[in-house]
Image: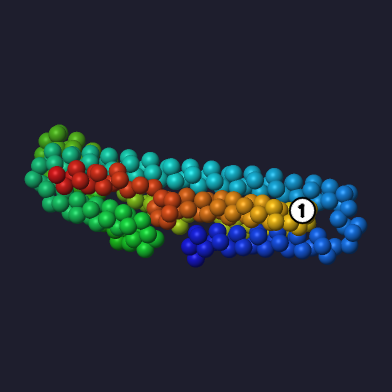
């Protein structure tokens, strides 16, 4: 189920709750919709609405922070790739084959990530690609170093490759997102209760129905934003792979 489908389900649930509330207002006995009863409903609904607003705000902030972190790390990773290529180029002919293999692997990974679909992201982060990074690091360690200059270059290359590998693992960890499903479920239940109360508290007319629909769109839209930003590599809202493609163009020059 895509994030759009989930948001649509949330919209239908909260809208249905609001319409049910409007229906209940007409079915309840008169003493249940007196001012004292409605005031009590407003107080309890206000508490739930406050909790839901806090959770929504925290989830949006957390998802945005995670997205920004991945974006910044990918940008730094592109810079590290350029640095690593420069180090291996300075190393000389002994690292020429390793440079070619890494460039080919990097180009394939960038091409997959540029598709910005879940399937391509999964292919870009499959275990064998990650294990290949360790193979590259082992080959760097095995490079011959007959003087201090080459030993220093080899050390720099190994350090840069370790940082690049860490970024790839970050992509794996962020691939499926980090938003708690039970927390989202509880949040949706809270929203349903809130909209049910809205329906009970509101008179049944066209303006009220339109207002409730707009609120439902806003609530489901917030859920959509949370889910989209929680998976920053694919979907409608995703980080840009432009730094990676720019780095690849420089490497291929």
Q: Which residue is mark 1?
A: 202
In-front residue for pair 3/125: 3
Q: Residue 6 falls in which quadrant of the image?
A: bottom right
Please give left or right for residue 150 compared with residue 135 in the image.
left
Please give left or right for residue 232 compared with residue 28 in the image.
left
> Which residue corresponds to the image point at 37% horizontal and 42% vertical from the top-left?
73
Judge whether 189 appears above or below 163 on screen. below
Judge whether 119 appears above or below 106 on screen. below
Q: Is residue 212 visible?
A: no
In-front residue for pair 84/215: 215
Q: Residue furthest front?
A: 206
* Model colouring: rainbow
> Which residue corresponds to the image point at 19% horizontal and 43% vertical from the top-left?
250
**Mark 1: few, some, or many residues within 10 Å (few <14, many ≥20)?**
some
Judge whether 242 appears above or below 118 on screen. above
Residue 101 percent coordinates (x, y): 17, 54
> Which residue corresponds to the image point at 35% horizontal and 47% vertical from the top-left?
240
- The image quadrant where one finds the C terminus is top left
Q: Is residue 152 visible?
A: yes
Q: Dot 1: what SS? A: loop
Residue 2 percent coordinates (x, y): 48, 62
Judge whether 160 appears above or below 20 on screen. above
Q: Residue furthest top?
A: 148
In-front residue for pair 19/50: 19
Q: Residue 161 falls in which quadrant of the image?
A: top left
Please give left or right for residue 138 compared with residue 2 in the image.
left
Residue 134 percent coordinates (x, y): 28, 53
Total marks placed: 1
> Which residue corresponds to the image point at 23% horizontal and 39% vertical from the top-left?
83
């Amino acid at each position: 189920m895509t994030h759009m489908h989930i948001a649509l389900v949330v919209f239908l649930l909260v809208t249905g709750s609001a319409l049910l509330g409007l229906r209940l207002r007409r079915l309840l006995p008169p003493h249940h919709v007196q001012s004292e009863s409605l005031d009590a409903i407003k107080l309890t609904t206000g508490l739930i609405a406050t909790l839901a607003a806090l959770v929504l705000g925290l989830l949006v902030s957390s998802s945005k922070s995670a997205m920004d972190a991945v974006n910044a790390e990918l940008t730094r990773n592109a810079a590290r790739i350029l640095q690593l290529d420069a180090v291996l180029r300075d190393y000389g002919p002994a690292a020429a084959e390793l440079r070619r293999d890494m460039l080919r692997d990097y180009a394939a990974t960038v091409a997959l990530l540029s598709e910005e679909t879940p399937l391509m992201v999964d292919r870009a982060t499959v275990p064998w690609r990650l294990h290949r990074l360790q193979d590259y690091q082992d080959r760097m360690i095995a490079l011959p170093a007959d003087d201090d200059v080459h030993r220093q270059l080899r050390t720099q290359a190994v350090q840069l490759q370790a940082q690049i590998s860490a970024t790839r693992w970050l992509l794996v960890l962020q691939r499926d997102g980090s938003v708690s499903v039970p927390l989202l479920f509880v949040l949706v239940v809270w929203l349903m209760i809130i909209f049910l109360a809205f329906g009970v508290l509101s008179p049944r007319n066209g303006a009220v129905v339109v207002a409730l629909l707009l609120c439902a769109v806003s609530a489901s839209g917030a859920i959509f934003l949370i889910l989209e930003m929680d998976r920053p590599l694919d979907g409608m809202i995703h980080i840009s792979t432009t730094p990676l493609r720019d780095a690849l163009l420089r490497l291929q020059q």
